[in-house]
Amino acid sequence: MLLVVACIVMVVAGVVQRLTGLGFALVATPLMVLLYGPVDGVLVVVVAGAVAAIVMLATMLGEVDWRRSLLLATAGVAASPLAAWVVHVSPPQALLLIVGSAGLLSLLGGRLVSVARMLTGTRGALFAGSASGFLHVASGLSGPPLVAYGLNDRWDQRSFAASLQVVFLVYHLITVAWRGLPRIEAEELGWLIGLSILGTLLGVLLARIVPSRWSRLGMLGIAWAGTIAVLVRGALAFLE
């Protein structure tokens, strides 16, 4: 039953990634953390997300803004050692709260845009990259600073969505380098990766018929439910 739920989540996350350009981790991370724990749950999403990013990038390679992508990715890599240290010294219940808080920040990211006018140009890219790289290694969720930067710097949406796949791929790889692979059965991980690819390809078809508003509402509903559950579980763990 656990594997069935995890597989469904991966398909949905892959679909959302293709429909919106981001959201794979936002949908998958809270539920994967509940299923596999705060360490392996994040790493499962990181590994599957890397493969999904490669698949999506293959269909949008010509849209990538390499200068912005490399600025964001490099800054994120520079911030990754601090995040890896935080993960290393934090107990499991603290990691649950970190993941839940990052999810909450992602869901409320729209408010961040209105107060982050500094996120433009090279300085803005370096700041956003550092913040998102730290969040990614610590929790698997890195969206809010990237979204704020993209909107404030008036980045074309298609180029932004394509370029994020480069950034996410680098973040995924550096997270695995610091934290390792998830400690689950290889066959199980293979199923989850394969279904994330299936979801991404399914999203290509659904993008032609599903209104973007519907996909966004579905993504937010799943993400809110998972994030609240993770925060509650983390709070209860501290009380035990």
Image: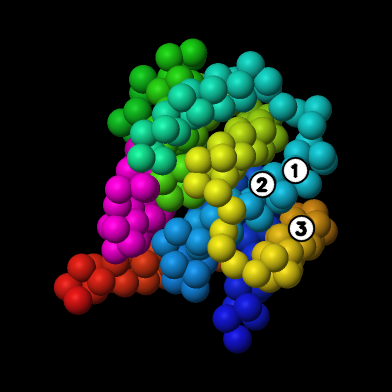
Res 76 visible: yes
120, above or below 53, in the image:
above
Crowding at label 1, few (<14), some or many (≥20) Cα neighbours within 10 Å? some
174 relative to 51 in the view: left or right: left
Q: Which residues are magenta?
A: 86-112
59 relative to 34 in the view: left or right: right
SS type, badge 2: helix
Precedes in sequence: disc 3 or disc 2: 2
Q: Residue at x 61, y 34 (%)?
A: 170
6, above or below 121, in the image:
below
Kindly report the distance in space between the C-alpha atoms of the residues bearing marks 3 and 2: 10 Å
174, above or below 40, in the image:
above
Q: Which quarter of the figure is the N terminus placed in?
A: bottom right
Which x, y percent locates residue 185?
65, 69
Q: Label 1 amino acid?
A: Ile
**Decide: marks 3, 2 in contact (CB < 8 A)?**
no
- Residue under pointer 3: 197
Crowding at label 2, few (<14), some or many (≥20) Cα neighbours within 10 Å? many
Precedes in sequence: disc 3 or disc 1: 1
Which x, y percent locates residue 49?
64, 51
**Decide: marks 2, 1 in contact (CB < 8 A)?**
yes
- Residue under pointer 1: 54
Which x, y percent locates residue 74?
54, 22
Which x, y percent locates residue 80?
45, 33
Q: Which quarter of the figure is the C terminus placed in?
A: bottom left
128 relative to 68 in the view: left or right: left
- Residue under pointer 2: 50
